[in-house]
Image: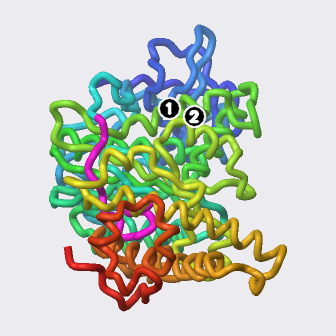
Amino acid sequence: MAFVEYTGIEKINGPIVILKGVEGIGYDEVVEVIPDSKDPDSKPRLGRAIMISNDAIMVQVFAGTEGLVPAVSSARFLAHPLEITLSPSILGRVFDGLGRPLDGNGPVYSDIKRNINGSPMNPMARVYPRDFINTGFSSIDVLMTLIRGQKLPIFSGNGLPHNQLAIQIASQARLMGDENFAVVFAGVGIKHDDAAAFSASLSSRGTNLVLFQNLADDPVIERIATPRYALTAAEYLAFDLGMHVLVIITDITSYCEALRELSVSRGEIPSRKGYPSYLYSDLASLYERAGVLKDKKGSITFLPILTMPNDDITNPVPDQTGFITEGQIVLSREIDARGIYPPIDPLPSLSRLMKDGIGKGYTREDHPSVSSQLFACYSRVQEVKALAEVVGADELGDDDKAYLAFGEKFEKTYISQAKDENRDIAQSLDMSWRLLASLPASALTRISMEDMEKYIKPNQKQGGDVNKAAPAER
């Protein structure tokens, strides 16, 4: 195929170059910007056409425009959009933010090339998400269950251990009863030490992992492409190879900030907090690529991680994300300060799809009632804590003191886990019963008498050791 090349750039504005007199170019076409058209050794910089008119073409340069001289620079149009080469051999590989191999094992050889700008799933072609994914964390598996095909973001803040949580979920997550499971992990705007930790810690996944890394010192504009490369790889694994794929991307906020920078360079009118007015639809174009399709064996489950600027959950990034996705997992700075890992706050967290993916046939028949009861009891703990701050803990009644003791055990032995601890769902549910056994029977208003008799021994009804006591035989 003959490439079209134009010498001379009209204008440079941040990561954007503008060319005039260019014809026959398509939107989103890949462009190679050559710093010195007369130097055969001049290394081209990858870009894409982002705006086309009769008079000019605007090109976004991923590697930035530093050092470009308009008069001697040239642009070569490659007549295709951004693509990724795909084959089963991508499993176990490490790529950079633009889909280029980083692991030294050479390029991916295949005739399959896919446009990274895939389309969101047609709602009429979707299957309602079901089937439980075991993350190994009691607080997530029991209280805000991740369902196959779901979009469940993690809302975090700067300095909180969301990257460690992401690594652990990626390392130990599994779909119950199906080993045809893979993880696509993408780091967007991550630090070098985080990238090294991701590579070292996720090596245990072996050939069940595809890793994309966009580093903090890489050009900011590259961050716009990285999630799309990861999702295109996930779509291939899921719908071509029939695998169940968990996609984890950290940090979506870095992606949105890159989107804001590009919007400013384009001269677009900013919306709230300077983000472009199309932030919602742009995020939806990512999130809605996850799900389960009719007549397809595989599935994509999406676990995006985003840091909330100033811990503000009303910031446009978490705010818009919450409208698109099916729940959220919220990390708390207050809980983290108490030395609890992972610092998940159950009360503002929820999974809107868990009710149809737990219980008999999925996890265990007692899961719905236990989850509801734990939420109710932990909510009551917060009320008792507020009361204790007013009247003093010594003035509380016996039931309220029992709630305080329950709350402390719940945080230190149930939410908190060792950084290499992997609990299965049965273990987490059994721990739930031992915790509830420490409360008076009158407090267990969301559990049937049948379940109480079945799962709590009579001598545990007024107290019990969470770590040592065993549940009743089933």
Q: Secondary structure at mark 2?
A: strand
Height in image: 245 above or below 31? below
Height in image: 145 above or below 410? above
Separation of residues labelled 1 and 2 (CA atoms) = 5 Å
The answer to which image quadrant residue 72 occupies is top right
Please say which color scheme the image uses: rainbow
Quadrant assignment for the C terminus: bottom left
Height in image: 397 above or below 56? below
Q: Which residue is mark 1?
A: 48
Q: Are marks 1 and 2 in contact (CB under 8 Å)?
A: yes
Q: Which residues are magenta?
A: 128-143
User: Which one is in front, 411 or 290?
Assistant: 411
Q: Which amino acid, by three-letter code, is at mark 2?
A: Gln
Q: Give the crowd class for mark 1: few <14, some 14-19, many >=20 residues within 10 Å.
A: many
233 displayed left or right of 220? left
The answer to which image quadrant residue 317 occupies is top right
